[in-house]
Each structure stands twice: as C-alpha cells, then as structure tokens.
Image (cartoon, rainbow, N blue to C red):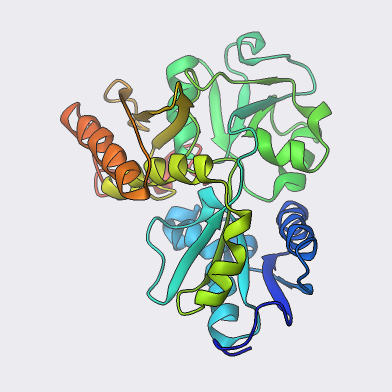
Amino acid sequence: MTPTESPSSSLVIATRESRLALWQAEHVQALLQARGHRVHLLGMTTQGDQILDRSLSKVGGKGLFVKELEVALEQGRAQIAVHSLKDVPMDLPEGFALACVLEREDPRDAFVSPRYANLDELPAGAVLGTSSLRRQVLLQALRPDLRITPLRGNLDTRLRKLDEGQYDAIVLAAAGLKRLGLGARLRSTFAPEAMLPAAGQGALGIEVRSDRADLIAALAPLAHTPTWLAVSAERAVSRALGGSCSMPLAAHARWTEGRLQLDAAWGDPEGRTPLVRASACAAVQSHAEAEVLGTQVAASLRARGAVGGVAGFDVAGLPGNAA
C-alpha cells in the first residue's frame, strides 16, 4: 500500500506472537473491522522475545520488542503495529508516529502466588520474581527482607516458572492477566500509592509511518483522549530522565476532578539512597500541557536526588534486572 491508497482497502497489523501480543492485535483488528476495514495480522518474533538469558538493558532495551515491527512498517509488509505502550521507547525513530492510544486497562501491578494471598503474607527470605528494576526498587522499599530475583519470558512462561516452584510469588501487570482471562491467578493488586505503575502501563498504542496521514485519520476514532493525555505526561517524566528498562523509574497519572494528578518515583537498585517521590497536579487539555507536567515532575525528582540515564548503575549484576 502506498501513502496515497485508502486505508480501507486492506490493513495489516504487525504483532509479536506471544499470546498477550496477539490478543492486543486481535482487539485492534476487531475495532477496525467494526468500522469497515479489512484487517489481517502479521505475526513476528522479535529480538526481545528471543533473548531470554540476558537483561534487556544490556542488549538494547525494550525497543527490541518493537524494532522488527517497525521494519515491517517501513518495508510496507504491514501498515500498523500494536504495542503495549510501556514497551515503546520514549522517542520513536524518525519516520514513525504514535497514531493513537486506546483506553487503558487496569494499570496496577498484580501479586500472583499459589500459596500466599498478598505481599504481607510472604515470609522473610521468600523468593519473589519481578520483571523490572522499577518493581524491584518499589518492592525493596516495601519488603527489604525478601529475595527479589529476575523473571524473564512472556506471561505464560512466567506463570509456568511460578507453578514449577522457582518462585514463592511473582509480580505481573494486572492488565495482561485480565486481557487473557487469567484474572483468577491474580491474588491481589497493589495500590498505586504503594507500587506506582510504569509509564504507559495497561495502555495500548498504535504505531504507523509518520507519512501516513490517511491512516492516522482512520485510527483517530479509536483514541481515548483521557488515557492518551495521561500517558503523555507519564512518558514525559521518563523521557526527561532518559528512562529505559534499566531506569528504576515509575510514573502514573490519573484524572481527579477534571485535573491530571501525576505521581512518580525513582529508586536506587543497590539501596544506597531512599526512594524518591514527586507529584504535581494541573489542568491538562493538550499533549503539550501533559508533557510540561511530566517535565516538571521529572525536575522535582532530580532535585530530590534521582539520577537520570543509566550511567550511575551497572545493572548486569543486580538482582531483578530483567525488564
């Protein structure tokens, strides 16, 4: 399809082949088909799916989950890519654009365990698996007596490792469990105040080539403006601090009485400094205003001791460094 062709002729969605990624792509496919588009899926295995023995921070970061999909867009083999927004780098490569963000699912983190109902029930020394430095530093602040260990793989792989007894409990995104009908595995959810979510957690983003104005217009009806503005603020915090999967950073925005409340937290994986938190609230009506709010919160984090970028850490040797 060339940039001048109608998007209604046929659309191909590039997607990872994990069960959750396919659910996300099929969800967007159904929304577009309901609007009269013919839509097919192009399943792909990304480098992020293939490399399971090293931390993502050492092999390219979460961008490894989207690069192959972007190549498919660039080559014209697909017209759109559906991503879990927390896996999307803060700055897209030149020639690509985030066409829309869908309404967010539950953004909270979930506690999953066959034996324990919640984090408080875990005995001292219990093994807790987590997929990110963000979760590690927040969990360390809540329960410094636990053994927090790396957990990589797709959702089904992580649950299998738990069921095999490799962990006493694991922490996952609640949205993924709910989308796959696995809500029964969710023993409890963390209040955002205790376990602040990652930027974009629970939201789906649709990426296209930036020269496809026709596609951007066709996808506009799928956008959920409140979610998009909230994640714009969250991603602005991460962008200002050089956020990546090797950045122990959380950012979560929520609407309250017509204003956007943005909370963020940064932690030192080695526990050398206390958890740093910052927040701000503002009337937000545009992406520019949302990004200003995010930049202000990032500046507050820096002023309180947060370290931007990854230069301050050698994450390879840290526990829980899988993103």
Residue at image position (63%, 11%) is 123
With 293 as the anchor, is 87 left or right in this view? right
In depth, the one of 246 and 293 nearer the eye is: 293
With 18 as the anchor, is 234 left or right in this view? left
Location of residue 184 in the rendering, given as x and y in whole percent from the top left corner: 83, 27
Residue at image position (65%, 78%) is 7
The image quadrant where one finds the N terminus is bottom right
Q: Does residue 121 show up?
A: yes
In depth, the one of 26 and 228 nearer the eye is: 228
Relative to 18, does residue 200 appear above or below in the rendering?
A: above
Relative to 158, does residue 80 appear above or below in the rendering?
A: below
In depth, the one of 196 and 106 nearer the eye is: 106
Relative to 13, does residue 224 appear above or below in the rendering?
A: above
Residue 317, quarter of picture: top left
With 157 as the anchor, is 148 left or right in this view? left
Location of residue 149 in the rendering, given as x and y in whole percent from the top left corner: 56, 34
Residue at image position (42%, 28%) is 137
Location of residue 204 in the rendering, given as x and y in whole percent from the top left corner: 60, 51
Location of residue 79 in the rendering, given as x and y in whole percent from the top left corner: 62, 77
Residue 3, quarter of picture: bottom right
